């Protein structure tokens, strides 16, 4: 299983390879992960180019907090984002509409 760092590197490469993934999006996601692979990461979706990486995002529109183990399940499609939110495994701050589009963003990982 990949590390969280590797997952974000894969998402970053997929977003750069296929810019159409971010078409019509202008959003900054921040992921605050706890647990085994604690850390802060970001995914920036812009019409002129999208990317992902480690560290805090500047002025995130949507901040997601969850355990690194649950994050891995989410990107692998083994956990539904809505279910994670409703069961308290995922906490959101910011734009709920962007959170609902998160699965499209994370699909960049599975498509790679």
Image (cartoon, rainbow, N blue to C red):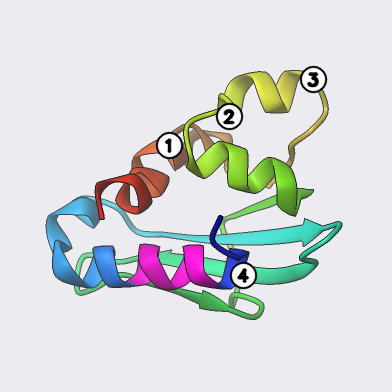
- Which circle's residue, 2 or 4, is located before the other in the chain? 4
Q: Is residue 52 above or below residue 29?
A: below
Q: Residues within 10 Å of mark 2 (few under 14, many from 20)?
A: many
- In magenta, the rendered stretch is 6-12
- Which circle's residue, 2 or 1, is located before the other in the chain? 2
Report which residue position mark 1 lands on: 103
As drawn, the label of residue 87 is 3
Q: Residue at x 30, y 70 (%)?
A: 50
- Which circle's residue, 3 or 2, is located before the other in the chain? 2
- Which circle's residue, 3 or 4, is located before the other in the chain? 4
Residue 49, image x and y in percent? 23, 73
Residue 107, image x and y in percent? 34, 43
- Which circle's residue, 4 or 1, is located before the other in the chain? 4
Instruction: Give the side of residue 85 with respect to residue 112, left or right.
Output: right
Report which residue position mark 2 lands on: 81
Helix, strand or loop: magenta stretch: helix
Instruction: Give the side of residue 73 with respect to residue 24, left or right.
Output: right
Please say if the residues under marks 2 and 1 sit with CB atoms less than 8 Å apart: yes
Say which quarter of the image contains residue 90: top right
Please say if the residues under marks 1 and 3 sit with CB atoms less than 8 Å apart: no
């Amino acid at each position: 299983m990949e590390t969280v760092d590797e997952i974000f590197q894969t998402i970053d490469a997929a977003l750069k390879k296929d810019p159409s993934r971010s078409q019509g999006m202008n959003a900054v996601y921040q992921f605050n992960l706890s647990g085994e692979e604690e850390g802060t990461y970001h995914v920036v979706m812009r019409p002129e180019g999208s990317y992902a990486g480690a560290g805090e995002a500047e002025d995130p529109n949507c901040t997601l907090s969850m355990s690194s183990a649950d994050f891995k399940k989410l990107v692998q499609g083994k956990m539904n984002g809505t279910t994670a939110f409703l069961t308290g495994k995922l906490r959101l701050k910011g734009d709920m509409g962007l959170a609902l589009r998160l699965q499209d963003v994370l699909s960049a990982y599975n498509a790679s």
